[in-house]
Image (tube, grey):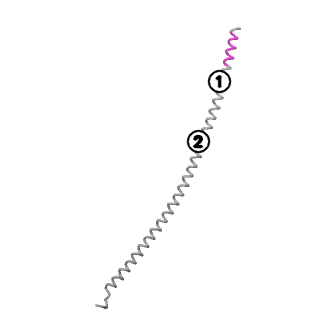
Amino acid sequence: MSELDDARKELAAARSENRQLEETIAELRGRLERARIDAENDSQRAVAAAHGEIVQLEETIRTLRHELEALRLVHTEELQQAARASRDEAAQLQETIALLRREMEAPHGSD
């Protein structure tokens, strides 16, 4: 019976080792699943953060475009005002020149 006892002991040891291996496998599967879930959550958070940044950048772009358009309009108006002022000044100068010519060409009564 010693051989039978030895076989039983080996069988019990093998079963114990199998249980330990199954427990280890189950633990590793659990860790792997938690790691997968954590990685998925991290990815979702990263995508959400990137989306938030994109939305902020798009809003910044819209704001800057509006500001640029407003500045363009102001600049255009300033250019138009400067052009009008220049034309007005040129017209006044031409009138002054014409007046001076007439005065120079007019006969003087004391000659």
Is 108 rendered above or below residue 12?
below
- The tag earlier along the polypeptide, 2 or 1, is 1
Residue type beneath disc 1: Leu
What residue do we see at 51% from left, 59% from top?
65
Q: Residue furthest right?
A: 1
Is 86 rendered above or below residue 63?
below
| Magenta stretch, residue numbers | 3-14
Q: Residue furthest front?
A: 110
User: In the shown orientation, is residue 104 left or right of residue 20?
Assistant: left
Residue type beneath disc 2: Ser
Is 96 rendered above or below residue 2?
below
Q: How many marks?
A: 2
Label 2 SS:
helix
Image quadrant in which you'd find residue 88:
bottom left
What residue do we see at 69% from left, 8% from top?
2
Which numbered circle lies on residue 21? 1
Which residue is at the front of the view, 30 or 71? 71
Which residue is at the front of the view, 88 or 17? 88
User: In the shown orientation, is residue 54 left or right of residue 18?
Assistant: left
Q: Position of residue 51 (x, y in %)?
A: 57, 48
Residue 7 lies in the magenta-colored region: yes
Give the residue pinned by disc 2: 43
Residue 10 lies in the magenta-colored region: yes
